[in-house]
Amino acid sequence: MTDDEKLLQQLLEKQKTGGLKPSDRFAIPSQPMPTQDEVERRSNIDEVALGYTETSARLEAMRCLQCKNTPCIEGCPVKIRIKDFVGAIADGNFGEALDIIKANSLLPAVCGRVCPQEVQCQAPCTVGKKFKDVEKGVAVGRLERFVADWDKSGDSIPEVAPATGKKVAVIGSGPGGVVVAADTRRAGHDVTVFEAFHKPGGVLVYGIPEFRLPKAIVQKEIDTLTKMGVDIVCNFVVGRTRTIAELMKEDGFDAVYIGVGAGLPRFMGIEGEHLVGVYSANEYLTRANLMKAYKFGKGADTPIAMSKKVAVLGGGNVAMDSARTAVRLGAEKVYLVYRRSEKEMPARVEEVHHAKEEGIEFCILQNPKRILGNEEGYVTGMECLKYELGEPDDSGRRRPIPIKGSEFTIDVDTVIVAIGNGANPLIGQTTPGLELSKWGNIVVDENCKTSLEGVYAGGDIVLGAATVILAMGQGRVAAAAINEYLTGKA
Amino acid sequence: MNVSHKILSKSQLSENVFTVEVEAPLVARARKAGQFVIVGISDDYGERIPLTIAGVDTDKGTIRLIWQRVGKTTAEMADLKIGESIDYIAGPLGNPTHIEKFGTVVCVGGGIGNAPLLPIATAMKEAGNKIIGILGARTKELIILEDEFAAISDELIVVTDDGSHGRKALVTEPLQEICSRDPKPDLAVAIGPAIMMKFCCRTTKQLDVPTQVSLNTIMVDGTGMCGGCRVEVGGKTKFVCVDGPEFDGHQVNFDLMMKRLGAYRTQEQKASAQYAEHRCKIGLTDTIRKKQ
Ligand SMILES: Cc1cc2nc3c(=O)[nH]c(=O)nc-3n(C[C@H](O)[C@H](O)[C@H](O)COP(=O)(O)OP(=O)(O)OC[C@H]3O[C@@H](n4cnc5c(N)ncnc54)[C@H](O)[C@@H]3O)c2cc1C
Ligand SMILES: Cc1cc2nc3c(=O)[nH]c(=O)nc-3n(C[C@H](O)[C@H](O)[C@H](O)COP(=O)(O)OP(=O)(O)OC[C@H]3O[C@@H](n4cnc5c(N)ncnc54)[C@H](O)[C@@H]3O)c2cc1C
Ligand code: SF4
Ligand code: SF4
Ligand code: FES
């Protein structure tokens, strides 16, 4: 028996005899996430975080105080009954835990892995507050992932109500689209998902890398949709192959959900951005993930730069994913260049931590001034400026200010720009009457309804850059509104 | 729903240029002149390549593709047989050409550029324009679609670099003459290799003839998500797949574009060579020329 198993036994004994006092719970060590060896994983694409064992999951769950006021639930955008599912795990009732989660979230295996827990469910946790350290709070996400992975049944297909004869079109197969498809299909509607790419899943397949979210998990969710009778049509670009008006007027769709995600990667508008070796993170990650460029020449046909020294610009999840992908593609040196300080980085804490372990060099309070190239147009370096932090700006974060005369050059052959995306223009351009914000995002009301009758939208195309769980949350809201709208419709 | 993309007919237009008529009913229904598709021949490991829709038969639900064998994917496509299928065809993509009655339109095609040019020239003709066609290539065998252009042109000039067919000249020579006429043409449309479009634009700019070009950048998604297709037009960054593929040629920075087109040259040569070797092993006869 391992020490952990002994500890669990002792705690269970104690629980039977007199119950666990908060002090007993505080004494349980916060359970670390086992990970793949930090050197070995630099040359493979397998998942880095390996997941809890039953013992560590139960120990972690026992740290939960079962607070009366459940502050954690407030932190979760879809209001999962965290206290109850964590309690069920502590008791060893994993099936029950799963049912509790599934009542609010369709993709626990995904959210448990990619939610920024430290600013959501884990942020208000009483245990973390006690230790004055969010990371010491109950590891809700890891527990959620544990139950999802524990669930080997997987093949249970949600029940579908009798056919209503109504047709729903879902545009885009990202997390929002998947949720809308499932929820409207469950209500008995005839549902078709239209996806522009040749594979469904949205950012979950083309953006977030395998080492963070195995594609098989996403595929399983897509398969469930198919088994429920949802029709998934790939290589169909709404706006071009068919407009929304045509789908509704000619093809008989009664309602439409637009979940086309973000588009148009932002560049900085500096000299040298058109050089060969300058990528948007979207392009770099799509080549690497969706098109499997890491196997170029060994089966895969999509090339990617064979970089030795890479600079990634930005400080979010997308930047971390790009930097860590570059390591796996064989780069010897990867710099992460961010103009604010590490405290302001929007990336998940765990990703920052993993990135550092993998040898990525953080260049904080720096920003490029121009990208340098040679005669053939290839990147040879990047001239940067040093920054300092001034007064807080509109976002509440301290404004980065360049330090005059602080120019210096770093030697790189590839630059990956991960500073965000604008809105995808295609739907807006081809859908007259659809109200857009001045940034091109679709405007919706509290039910995710757009300015057009029967047309709903959510996810990144509405929120700008969002998260998986926010996109799912909007999907939930939109699906409920669509179901209600269709009930009333003759 | 799985849409089938069976090849109904296929032929070879020159040593390295192939054409197929392939089922793509959704694309055929929506397509307008100037648009393109993204084609993939293997779902899991294949590349996504953009090809112009060279023609369409809406009754049959088919489109025509014409491509030049330059690398691995276009070579694999050249080996597909009638009755076999292309894995996926997404589109139509890009903005349709702005077609109206301009007056006289001079249409300049270089090499494989004749393929994307033909539907545009045809639509311009149908809109009541007078069409002057200029077709150019390195040598006789590489001039494609001459008969089709002859059928719609009011005047057709063919040139080759080596003089093996038509006049011995580069396309810019007759273009210069035509643009110097009085009255000069109202519009030029130039489609071909980037270098050709660059020099055509230089010519027409001097003579003040507005010029449209259709750009063939490297692409991935074709929906405005990746930014791989970006070009500099009038000093601003534009995305060929959603802002183009046609642009005011006088505003395009061709030098930058040409550099970006060469981004993967070494790797692609490797992939082509591997494929050529593989073909030899499996006994396909004619070998791929590595250099065009
Ligand atoms: C690299 C990266 C890392 C990220 N990491 C995290 C993370 O760790 N945690 C987190 O919570 N969030 C993360 N995000 C953000 C998160 O992935 C997104 O907020 C979320 O995926 C948005 O979902 P969505 O439903 O809007 O659709 P998306 O996932 O954006 O998918 C939209 C789909 O619509 C398709 N589409 C687009 N246009 C059309 C059209 N005209 N017709 C048909 N289909 C179309 C697209 O091809 C795509 O498949 C990350 C994003 C990226 C890019
Ligand atoms: C909007 C658009 C429409 C197009 N229409 C046609 C068409 O109708 N017929 C046709 O033959 N081609 C067309 N192209 C070009 C075509 O996409 C490329 O030739 C093809 O991607 C090459 O793939 P490959 O794997 O065979 O070659 P690769 O191995 O990818 O490349 C081989 C060589 O071709 C060059 N190359 C790669 N991509 C392109 C490109 N996009 N344009 C020019 N050179 C390239 C490479 O630098 C390399 O030297 C179009 C491109 C665009 C963007
Ligand atoms: S869905 Fe995300 S925010 Fe909600 S409990 Fe799960 S991990 Fe936390
Ligand atoms: S706040 Fe923390 S300790 Fe309290 S119920 Fe939620 S997870 Fe448990
Ligand atoms: S091809 Fe990706 S944005 Fe144009």
Image (cartoon, rainbow, N blue to C red):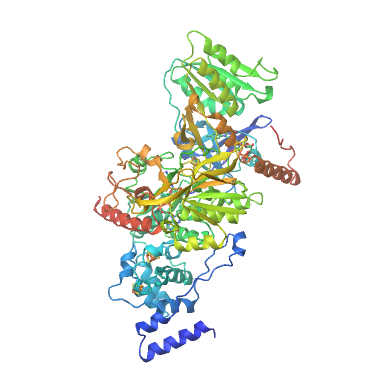
Left or right: B230 in relation to A489? right
Q: In the image, what residue occupies the spot 62% across and 35% down?
A: A376
Q: In the image, what residue occupies the spot 27% across and 73% down?
A: A69
Does residue A331 appear anywhere in the picture?
Answer: yes
Figure quadrant of residue B270: top right
Given the current orientation, which residue lies at the most extreme bottom position?
A17
Residue A458, how many percent across, how many down?
Answer: 35, 51
Q: In the image, what residue occupies the spot 54% across and 12% down?
A: B178
Given the current orientation, which residue lies at the most extreme top position?
B182
On screen, A479 above or below B52?
below
On screen, A478 above or below B93?
below
Of A166 and B274, nearer the camera is B274
Residue B64, how many percent across, how many down?
Answer: 55, 33
Residue B23, how many percent across, how many down?
Answer: 53, 39
Image quarter hosting the N terminus of chain A: bottom right
Figure quadrant of residue A25: bottom left
On the rendering, which quadrant does ligand 2 occupy?
top right
Does residue A163 appear anywhere in the picture?
Answer: no
Residue A423, how many percent across, how many down?
Answer: 39, 44
Q: In the image, what residue occupies the spot 54% across and 83% down?
A: A2
- How many labels, in total? 0
